[in-house]
Amino acid sequence: MQPILYLHGFNSSPLSFKAQALLKRWRAAGLPAEKLYIPTLPNDPRAAIALADAWLQQQPDAVLVGSSLGGCYATYLAEKYGSKALLINPAVRPWLRFHAYLGPQQNYSTGERWELTAAHVEALAQLKTPPPQAPERFVVWLQTGDETLDYREAVDFYRGCQLDVQQGGDHGYQGFAERIPELLAFAGYTV
């Protein structure tokens, strides 16, 4: 049973639906609290990666779970550590589209207000990685109804990985709670 690091998406937090559903299921199954880490990721990509990196140095066998922008972070870190990763509607090359969002932002979960700057976008571009070098380590869950990201970009980028493309749905990933047992099984847990 491997530790799990859950990385939330842009303008999200550990209070998001997916993070809370995972935490609820984890607790209900009586799994060890220290084996699941759902950090509040800083808005600055460098700080977000540094936070995750510090934890992964202590838990090098962890499985990464990333949603949206967290999927981009998880891909970068999985390649760095040779880790397994389960990605949910992951952002592919977000630095190419974030210029359109420069300026004031508000976190959907916490209400925090902050400013997205060109420096944030440049920091994201520093995370550029090629498609996974060991695709067998990656599971990618996509929904074609994602209103935020074009799922076809992920299909192309993660070609060779275990892709699960569901028709319909949305960026939040409809039916996530029902799939948590699969996520946990990916990390070696039976619930």
Image (tube, rainbow, N blue to C red):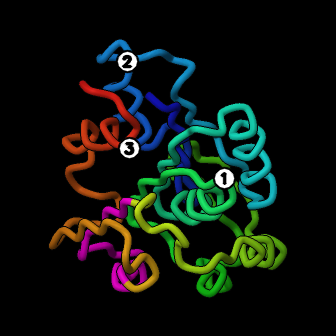
Mark 2, residue position: 27
User: Which residue is nearer to you in this view: 56 or 106?
Assistant: 56
User: Which residue is nearer to you in this view: 75 or 150?
Assistant: 75
Highlighted magenta segment, given as a residue range: 139-155
Mark 3, residue position: 18
Q: What's the residue type where badge 3 is placed?
A: Lys
Counting from the top left corner in percent of width and height, residue 12 is at 54, 51
> Which image quarter is the N terminus in?
top left
> Which image quarter is the C terminus in?
top left
Counting from the top left corner in percent of width and height, residue 182 is at 26, 42
Q: What's the residue type where badge 2 is placed?
A: Arg
Is 154 one of the magenta-colored residues? yes
Q: Earlier in the sequence, mark 1 or mark 2?
A: 2
User: Which residue does the image show at 23% across and 44% down from the upper left?
Assistant: 179
**175 relative position to 25: left or right:** left
Q: Is residue 27 above or below residue 17?
A: above
- How many residues crowd mark 3 within 10 Å: few (<14), some (14–19), many (20+)? many
SS category of the residue bearing label 1: helix
Q: How many marks?
A: 3
**71 relative position to 126: left or right:** left
Locate residue 124: give its quadrant: bottom right
Is 82 one of the magenta-colored residues? no
Q: Label 1, label 2: how many angstroms apart (C-alpha)? A: 27 Å
